[in-house]
Amino acid sequence: MSRHNSRNIIEYADAVIVGAGASGLAAAIELRMNDPSLSVVIIEKNDVPARKIRATGNGRCNITNRNAEGYTEIMKFFTSIGLVTRTYDNGLVYPYSESAADAAELLISRAEELGARIITDAEVTSACASGDSRFATSFELKTADGRGSRTITSEYLILACGGKAGPMFGTTGDGYGIARSFGHSIVTPVPVLTPVECREWGSRDENDAVCLAGTRTRGTVALIKNTDDAGCSVDGAELFMETGEIQFTKYGLSGICIFNMTRHMRYDRSKGESLEDFAVRTDLFPDGDITEFLRDRQKHAFSGEKTADVLRTVLKANIAGYVLKKACGEACDENLAEKEVGDLTDADILAISHQVHGLTFHPERLKGWKEAQATSGGVSLDELDPVTGGSLITPGLFITGELADRDYMCGGYNLSNAWLTGIGAAHAILTSDSHK
Ligand SMILES: Cc1cc2nc3c(=O)[nH]c(=O)nc-3n(C[C@H](O)[C@H](O)[C@H](O)COP(=O)(O)OP(=O)(O)OC[C@H]3O[C@@H](n4cnc5c(N)ncnc54)[C@H](O)[C@@H]3O)c2cc1C
């Protein structure tokens, strides 16, 4: 039942969902599929729903992973809405068409066909609860849009408005203020799964790593922290290690293993820590031993073969050139690149090995929210039911997806969390005493 006037629309729904993204759409579908008598409204600030889903997986949408928590339940959900999927050997699952836009359209049309109402171009500006007994609580939301304001009351409220990563998709952290207004605490959100700017870029001398820009290589990345929990300098604890594709950009490091590494770059300003406490050590020849390789080539070198030419058989030319420049300092030799491989001394080989197996970069800045794919931090998990995302402070309120303090590595795990928590909230509503 709704009452309209030109300035303010007042209406009621059984469940209101803020955000037509991954977890919001999953919750709406699950609610209406299991109980068509429930009125479900999704409020979305963008002019189209599911804007972020369309951009996921480089437009291919890595929807889940065979190893993700709740994988079976997630796949059951996608089967129920008719999404055909394909799974790669590494466990990554995509829509069969590998089109994120098609997956987004399917979710939207299923939600609408099932009778959920999606209101777009409407931004929720505030929400509050009324009622004092456990089952009398109802919610009142205010939204603003170009046409005026809207007040919606509901029995259940699902906050599915995401974190702060990718603000161009509508996720600008609005959910934190709304959750706070219900008494929830927020673990400081920081951007993760993002490229890293490093000090080695921009020195404009021969050691400027900008010569590496645009190169991709397979390697191992290790994150070292040079301070302990009390902020004291230590030998360098290894916090993270992963082998994969390293991308050198015009400002620093990128690629999946770098993205995953950023989840471990937490530091505490109050203890005097900063990003500068970290170092990123790379192994650019993770499948072999460059010392053995060079010694072997010394035995079998072609006449006059230069070190740079030999190194280029295992590293890309600009990476080999950079590594040799860095090794020159340690080996006290001005031009290792031009030196014949047969003339390399033990000290030369050791210096090259240090660089190939331990080329180190120093982070200065994480690329910000615009380039981040996920948010670390958010609504404290201590205040939420671990399965349903139900608020332990305000009955009837649910926090789903990236808005809660959960973040995962690349590979379909963040979307998995969104689908699973959306479905979990819906099931909690469907089985709650007040609903039955
Ligand atoms: C470029 C990119 C690529 C990614 N690729 C992958 C991938 O391939 N696989 C993977 O697992 N994860 C991927 N992720 C992460 C994944 O997309 C998110 O973790 C997931 O979408 C979070 O779901 P959610 O439901 O919490 O929020 P979202 O899907 O972000 O949806 C939140 C919605 O709420 C709306 N909203 C916000 N505030 C308000 C308000 N005040 N009023 C009304 N509406 C509001 C927003 O406009 C948005 O539509 C990627 C992220 C990015 C940025």
Image (tube, grey):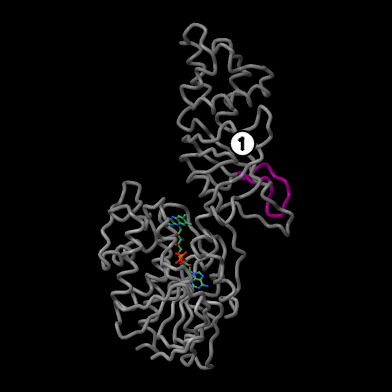
- Asked whether 318 or 342 is in front, the reply is 318
Instruction: Provide the residue span drawn in magenta.
Output: 224-237
Please tell me whether residue 259 is drawn above or below residue 420 in the rendered image.
above
Q: Quadrant of the N terminus?
A: bottom left
Residue 5 at x, y percent in the picture:
47, 89
Relative side of 287 to 371, left or right:
left
Q: Which residue is mark 1?
A: 360
Residue 108 at x, y percent in the picture:
34, 68
Residue 230 among those drawn in magenta: yes
Of the residues shown, which amino acid type is indicated by label 1? Thr
* Residue 338 found in image quarter: top right
Q: How many marks?
A: 1
Residue 45 at x, y percent in the picture:
48, 71
Relative side of 53 to 294, left or right:
left
Does any atom of ligand 1 lie closer than 8 Å to the CB of label 1?
no
Label 1 CA crowd tier, 10 Å (few <14, some 14–19, many 20+)? some
Residue 318 at x, y percent in the picture:
54, 27
- Asked whether 329 or 165 is in front, the reply is 165
Please tell me whether residue 240 is drawn above or below residue 318 in the rendered image.
below
Relative side of 136 to 29, left or right:
right
Q: Quadrant of the C terminus?
A: bottom left
Which residue is pictured at 44% across the width and 68% down the height?
A: 47
